[in-house]
Image: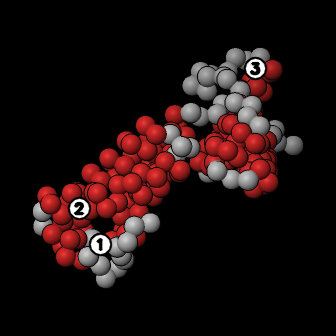
Amino acid sequence: MSTPLPQDIIKRLQHHDSDALTIVYNHYVKDLWRYVYFRTNRNRDTADDLTSIIFTSLISSVHNYNPEHASFDTWLYTIARNKIADHLRKHYRRKKLTLVSYDLNEPPSSSPTHTHAYEQADILNRTLDQLTPQQHQLLIWKYQDKLTVKQIAKKINRTNKATENLIYRARLTFKDHYNKLANAFTMTTAEPA
């Protein structure tokens, strides 16, 4: 990370000094871009876009910066972390894993087989919605995209063993949520004795 900037530069930036903005930008852009790049699966276009968004956010909110609460570096990288998280949440929502492709907006037919498959699809999709974005993405890569552990490890910049553990925990979480939903569904649809 870069060495901290003098506080007078930050104060000038808070007073909309364009020279101060240039100094801040030149001081942080390379490290910030690299930070974003390695947290967005090494995607250059995404890193470029998010770095621009982060600096735009910095400009619009620099008046909120208070050196008594955090260093400028901490404040700036908090903005970066939040923008990356926003991006990843949007990305995961767009690429939603659907294990069974039934249109859940359409009512099921009266056939018992179709009704059961529809109910299973509903439970699976509700289960997936309860996973964290990382767990969701790991399961997409592993079971939908059929990537190997080694390929996934490379994407997330982790060791194979750490990646295996993450996938294992994602499966356990999925199984736990699935069983709870399936049991709750069974209890609500069970016929009275």
The mark found on residue 114 in the picture is 3
Earlier in the chain: of badge 2 and badge 1, it is: 1
Q: Residues within 10 Å of mark 1 (few under 14, many from 20)?
A: some
SS class of the residue under badge 1? loop
Quick check: marks 2 and 1 in contact, CB under 8 Å? yes
- Residue drawn at point x = 67 percent, y = 44 percent: 154
Instruction: Tell me which amino acid carries mark 3.
Output: His
- Residue drawn at point x = 67 percent, y = 23 percent: 101
In this figure, which residue is indicated by the disc labeled 1? 5
Query: How far apart in space, not on screen, are marks 2 and 1 (Cα)?
Result: 9 Å
Single out the residue that lies furthest toward the right.
Answer: 193
Query: How far apart in space, not on screen, are marks 1 and 3 (Cα)?
Result: 64 Å
SS class of the residue under badge 2? helix
105 lies above or below 1: above
In this figure, which residue is indicated by the disc labeled 2? 23
- Residue drawn at point x = 26 percent, y = 62 percent: 24
Give the mark count. Answer: 3
Q: Is residue 45 left or right of residue 65?
A: right
Residue 159 visible? The answer is yes
- Residue drawn at point x = 36 percent, y = 77 percent: 70
Percent of width and height locating residue 133: 59, 48
Percent of width and height locating residue 132: 61, 51
The mark found on residue 162 in the picture is none
Instruction: Tell me which amino acid carries mark 1.
Output: Leu
Q: Residues within 10 Å of mark 3 (few under 14, many from 20)?
A: few
Instruction: Tell me which amino acid carries mark 2.
Output: Ile
Name the colouring of the figure: secondary structure
Earlier in the chain: of badge 1 and badge 3, it is: 1
Q: Looking at this view, is 126 or 96 the one in front?
A: 96
Q: Is residue 59 left or right of residue 134?
A: left
Percent of width and height locating residue 72: 33, 71
